[in-house]
Amino acid sequence: MPKETSFQTILEALLDLSATFPARYLARFSDLEPAQLEALAQVWPRVPLARKVALLEDLQDLAEDDTLVSFEAFARARLKDPEPAVRAGALRLLIECEDVHLIPDLLDLLNADDEPEVRAAAAVVLGQFVYLGELDKIPAETLREIEDHLLAATQDAYPVVRQRSLEALGTSSRPELPALIEAAYHENDPDWIVSALFAMGRSGDLRWSKQILSKLNDPNQAVRTEAMQAAGELGLAAARPALLDRLEDEEDRLVRHEIIWALSQIGGEGVRQRLEELADAAEAEADDEEAEFLEEALSNLAFTEDTGLFDMFDFETEEDPDDL
């Protein structure tokens, strides 16, 4: 068995600007011990900003692909970094953190950081705690405090902070939220409409069905994609025919994946057959990436079918999404 590379060697590689930082070392930033954090803190000021940002981005990509790694300790140590790009990157590594001890730091960043990018990133992480609060996994008073600060941040001077704060409140049951979502939806700005649709999808509230369905064929791709995701989140069976039709014509693989995943969340007539056909085609073409994705989608569809919830929300709407 090969000898494990020492953490000091990894730090030296981080400082070696004559070579690309080896990807094989990225996982070693997972679950850092106090001594390793201290050693990293000693060399961190000597690392150029571009390499710091690239490292944070690479760690985020790895965290999305590998559920066994955790860069929480590393990210927490970067929250007070003098560089805004580092603070924002560290926050993106904390998107799934459930430790309530992090909340005070997040609120400080949301309320007082000089950079809107950082305030917006803090709002995104706080959205995880709003969700946990709605599940009664954090104290009610803590949830209330977070919601109060996010509601205040929806009045921030910078649109990106207002938008991320609205999105973070998506799962909240606060009575102030529907009016904020409605106002964002009616903004003549795709970015605001996307934020409104994101919040609608997270809300679990079927009052937004008509608005979501009306955006499935929006001229703006970002709006269309977010509407698909929201339809999937809410399990809107009324969106199924339009999504199946769009799946036939869509050539962009990323958009196709969004459609497929939304269909796997909705389920119902024709969905399993179509996804199985696509899976068979991917296997025949030896497209391993597509086959793997479709396998995951079919597993998610099986979960949807097991819950028995699809078609529960297949109600009459004033508009047929096929006609939009």
Image (cartoon, rainbow, N blue to C red):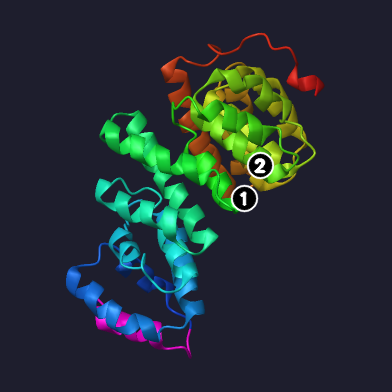
Percent from the top left, x then y, of residue 135? 33, 29
Q: Looking at numbered disc 1 in the image, what kind of residue is underneath it?
A: Pro
- Residue 196 sits in quarter: top right
Would residue 65 be found to the left or right of residue 191 on screen? left
- Residue 319 sits in quarter: top right
Percent from the top left, x then y, of residue 44? 35, 80
Q: Is mark 2 on a helix, strand or loop?
A: helix
Q: Residue furthest top?
A: 316
Instruction: Indicate yes or no whether the magenta region holds residue 255.
Output: no
Kindly identify the residue that appears in the image at 51 percent across and 78 percent down.
50
- Residue linked to disc 2: 192
Q: Residue 222 carries which label?
A: none
Percent from the top left, x then y, of residue 51? 48, 78
Which residue range is magenta in the image? 4-19
Q: Nearer the viewer, residue 168 or 47?
A: 168
Q: Nearer the viewer, residue 182 or 240?
A: 182
Q: Looking at numbered disc 2 in the image, what kind of residue is underneath it?
A: Trp
Q: Residue 159 carries which label?
A: 1
Would residue 35 be found to the left or right of residue 209 on screen? left
